[in-house]
Amino acid sequence: MSIGKFCHRQVITAQRDDSVLEAAKLMRQHHVGDVLVIEAHNGRNIPVGIVTDRDLVVEIMAPELAPETITVGDIMVEEIAVIEQSVGVFEAIQNMRIKGIRRLPVVDKSGGLVGIITFDDLLALLAEELGTLVKAVAREQQKEVNSRR
């Protein structure tokens, strides 16, 4: 199963010079915990950073800074991990574990943004798959009971 099949294609994005207040409003409006910072290169949106709700709390709210004057580019994490859409689910999970992250922008072969996959998305997918396995076990047991009557 490639990660491209499961990622969210509607990604909330911002530009480096957008204020963190604008980013926070986008997160609230779209009920997400992050915005991806993008730059246009050759007609493609390339992810260059990420700002999370935690970044806003730790970097802006706690030190009581003015969110309307600080830009997304000032606080974004620039060295973001991305994953190519053809990569499998297990590799995405391993990537998150190794890098200690909860969100992975999904890109095409040229690095253009196609979506995002989160820890929560993968957890829901795995829970669904495990539920399917449980149903298979139960069905096998019922089949055995029926065949031995």
Image: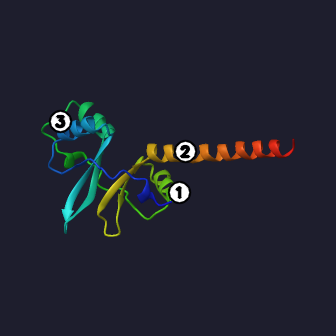
Q: Position of residue 123 (x, y in %)?
A: 50, 44
Please tell me whether residue 85 is drawn above or below residue 18 in the rendered image.
Answer: below
Q: Which residue is mark 3?
A: 67
| Mark 3–mark 1 distance (CA, rounded to whole Å) | 38 Å
At numbered mark 2, what does the secondary structure look like: helix, strand or loop?
helix
Q: Quadrant of residue 137?
A: top right
Give the residue type that dot 3 points to.
Answer: Pro
Give the residue at x 31% y 38%.
53
Neighbours of disc 2 within 10 Å: few (<14), some (14-19), many (20+): few
Nearest to viewer (mark 2 / mark 1): 2
In this orientation, which residue lies closer to the viewer: 115 or 138?
A: 138
Q: Are marks 3 and 2 in contact (CB under 8 Å)?
A: no
Q: Residue 90, labelled with which disc?
A: 1
Q: Position of residue 4 (x, y in %)?
A: 41, 59
In this orientation, which residue lies closer to the viewer: 127 or 24?
A: 127
Give the residue type that dot 2 points to.
Answer: Glu
Give the residue at x 47% y 56%.
92
Give the residue type that dot 1 points to.
Answer: Phe
At numbered mark 3, what does the secondary structure look like: helix, strand or loop?
loop
Q: Position of residue 52 (x, y in %)?
A: 31, 42
| Mark 2–mark 1 distance (CA, rounded to whole Å) | 15 Å
Q: Is residue 75 left or right of residue 131?
A: left
Please tell me whether residue 13 is drawn above or below residue 53 in the rendered image.
Answer: below
In this orientation, which residue lies closer to the viewer: 60 or 104?
A: 104
Nearest to viewer (mark 3 / mark 2): 2
| Mark 3–mark 2 distance (CA, rounded to whole Å) | 39 Å
Please tell me whether residue 62 is drawn above or below residue 69 in the rendered image.
Answer: above
Q: Residue 128, labelled with which disc?
A: 2
Q: Is residue 27 left or right of residue 4?
A: left
At numbered mark 1, what does the secondary structure look like: helix, strand or loop?
helix
